[in-house]
Image: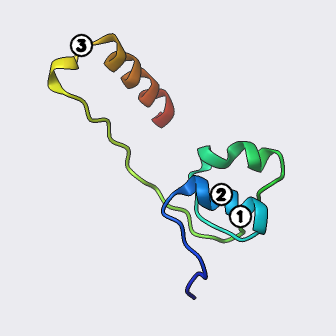
Amino acid sequence: YVPKISFGVAAMALSHILKNGGSGYFTEGSVRKLLDEGLLTIVKDSPSFQRPTYLCYPINTMESSLHKAAMRALRRIIH
């Protein structure tokens, strides 16, 4: 099966699906509110994907308060 339309930007794809119907793969966090509101549903038996997350930063900011806050937030999300 080849989709009739594809998007490189998730927000554009989501907008299109909400207006016109269809299906797509999105991160759960990006559509959680829409799932909770019943505007979207998870397709039964559809494959799910795990994607690694990386944090990149310049070496000279390793001790900055922004870096520390980003690391705390990332740890809350992944644990």
Q: Residue furthest bottom?
A: 1
What kind of residue is marked 2? Leu
Circle nearer the viewer, 1 or 3: 1
Q: Alpha-carbon neighbours of circle 3 within 10 Å: few (<14), some, or many (≥20)? A: few
Graded by Cα atoms within 10 Å as few (under 14), some (14 to 19) or many (20 or more), the crowding at tag 2 reads many
Residue at the image point whose x is 83% and y is 45% from the top: 37
In the rendering, which numbered label is found on residue 17? Answer: 1
Q: Check disc 3 and report its element: helix, strand or loop.
A: loop
Secondary structure of the residue carrying numbered label 1: helix
Between disc 3 and disc 2, the foreground one is 2
Instruction: Give residue 57's position: percent from left, percent from top.
Output: 24, 30
Asked whether the beta carbons under mark 1 and mark 2 sit within 8 Å of each other, the answer is yes
Q: Based on the displayed image, in which of its 4 quarters is residue 16 positioned? A: bottom right
Q: Residue 6, how many percent across, how many down?
A: 55, 72
Q: Which residue is mark 2?
A: 14
Q: Residue drawn 69% across and 45% down?
A: 32
* SS assignment at label 2: helix
Tell me which amino acid carries mark 1: Ile
Say few, some or many: other residues with alpha carbon within 10 Å of mark 1 (under 14 / 14 to 19 / 20 or more): some
Which residue is denoted by mark 3 in the rendering? 63
Tell me the quarter of the picture where residue 63 sits: top left
Number of dots carrying numbers: 3
